[in-house]
Image: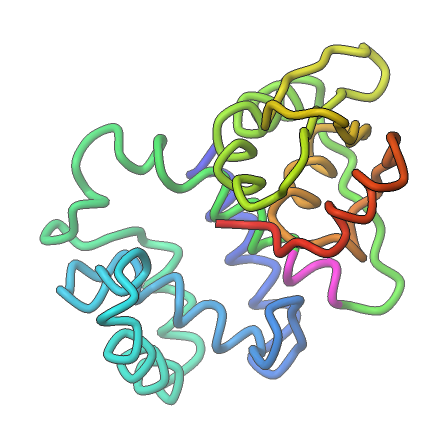
Amino acid sequence: MAAREREEMASSVEQLGPEAPTLCEGWTVRDLVAHLVERESGSPAALGVAVPAVRGYLEDRRVRRASGDFAALVERFRSGPPRTSFFSVPGLDTLLNPSEFFIHHEDVRRAQPGWEPRALSVRHQDALWKLVRVAGRLAVVRVPTGVVAERAGTGEQVTLKKGSPAVIVRGEPAEVLLFTHGRRDHAQVELLGDESALAALRSTRLGV
């Protein structure tokens, strides 16, 4: 899934161009691609993704990278991480990149006028549902109430955070994944539950 999403996103950003908007506040397509390239670069700065103390250094490197040639930047992203990057370790791309690439691809797509959800295969949605079960738990950890994801069409549920009362987030796996990672206004989900729980969910920052 990561390899397919990488290629599809590379094609999308090529078509839209470097100055197209994204759902990442303040970032253009150029900025977002630079972030993804820097994240996989193998530089110690890439630790800034997870370590607050070095995020400023990472941002400086991202800004410098974004100032370069856009076509070369996209090609760097498309070609994958260098061999010096821990992302090149067999298995890590599959483990760490599917949700990152899917969400950021949608950050690009859904920031454009007239966007529509992609028509995804059942197999693709199945893969995204697995991501909801894992990444979704981390994404709602700050919510002070219970959160249950429900897959539209099948009724399958997974508890992302235990608690009572609980909110049910119902939608296709792609939409639930996007919602739990903070794309509230651009995710097509239905929220069900006690008003106090709904208010708690709406007032809490979602995402890792």
Asked if residue 20 lies left or right of residue 83, the reply is right
What secondary structure is the stretch in magenta mostly built from?
Answer: helix
Asked if residue 94 lies left or right of residue 147, the reply is left
In x, y percent, where is residue 108?
64, 63
Q: Quadrant of residue 157?
A: top right
In x, y percent, where is residue 91?
26, 28
In x, y percent, where is residue 188?
84, 43
Depth check: give the residue in front, 164 or 126.
Answer: 164
Colour basis: rainbow
Q: Residue furthest left?
A: 84
- Total numbered labels placed on residues in the image: 0
Q: Is residue 70 above or below residue 83?
A: below
In x, y percent, where is residue 61?
27, 80
Whether residue 109 is in magenta: the answer is yes
Residue positioned 59% across, 81% down in the render: 26
Whether residue 81 is in magenta: the answer is no
Residue positioned 54% across, 21% down in the render: 130
Q: Quadrant of residue 37?
A: bottom left
Residue positioned 15% across, 65% down in the render: 43
Q: Is residue 16 above or below residue 197?
A: below
Asked if residue 74 lies left or right of residue 182, the reply is left
Asked if residue 122 lies left or right of residue 191, the reply is left
Query: Which stretch appears magenta?
Result: 107-111
Residue positioned 12% across, 49% down in the render: 83
